[in-house]
Amino acid sequence: ARVPSAAWLSERKRDFRAGNSLRDRVGEARPVSRPRRTTGAMRLEVKRCGNVHSELVAAVGWNAENELYSCGDDKQIARWNANGDAGGKVCDLDAFVTAMHFSPAPRSADASAAAFAAACSDGTLRFFLRNG
């Protein structure tokens, strides 16, 4: 197999960077097909929500009812609605939460049966039900 020379590779790189045509081994021009770059396709609104946590928030999770739960270094779990409004404190803990995960959507019509697990800094794994 023939190995391309350094000069040939350098020329190909220059053509590619310039957005011109690339040349194949026999020197014929072939058009470059590149997707267009788009900017600003996604815009996020940053919103400071309430003063529920007094310390750093370490973990968050969405449940099937479109509620957000947050766990902070203040050792409490809080609930939020989809608009970012605080739903209040769910409970206080005696350890820091390092991670949380919600169970899949409940199969029953009783949405209050939704559950989540929280891993804590004291080595425990704690399970919570939405209804307490």
Image (cartoon, rainbow, N blue to C red):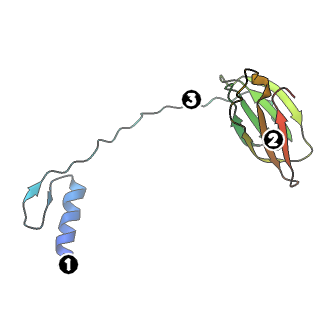
The image quadrant that residue 68 belongs to is top right
53 shown above or below 108: below
**Disc 1 marks which residue?**
3
Give the percent coordinates (x, y) of residue 89. 84, 29
Image quadrant holding the N terminus, namely bottom left
Q: How many marks?
A: 3
Q: Distance between the residues labelled 1 and 2?
A: 60 Å
Q: How far apart are marks 2 and 3 (CA)?
A: 22 Å
> Could you tell me which secondary element the residue under label 2 belongs to?
loop
- The one nearer the camera, 47 or 110, is 110
- Residue drawn where x is 79% and y is 42% of the image: 117
- Kind of residue at badge 3: Glu
The image quadrant that residue 118 belongs to is top right
- Residue drawn where x is 72% and y is 29% of the image: 106
Horizontal arrangement in the rendering, residue 8 relative to residue 113 (left or right): left
**Disc 2 marks which residue?**
55
The mark nearer the N terminus, 2 or 3, is 3
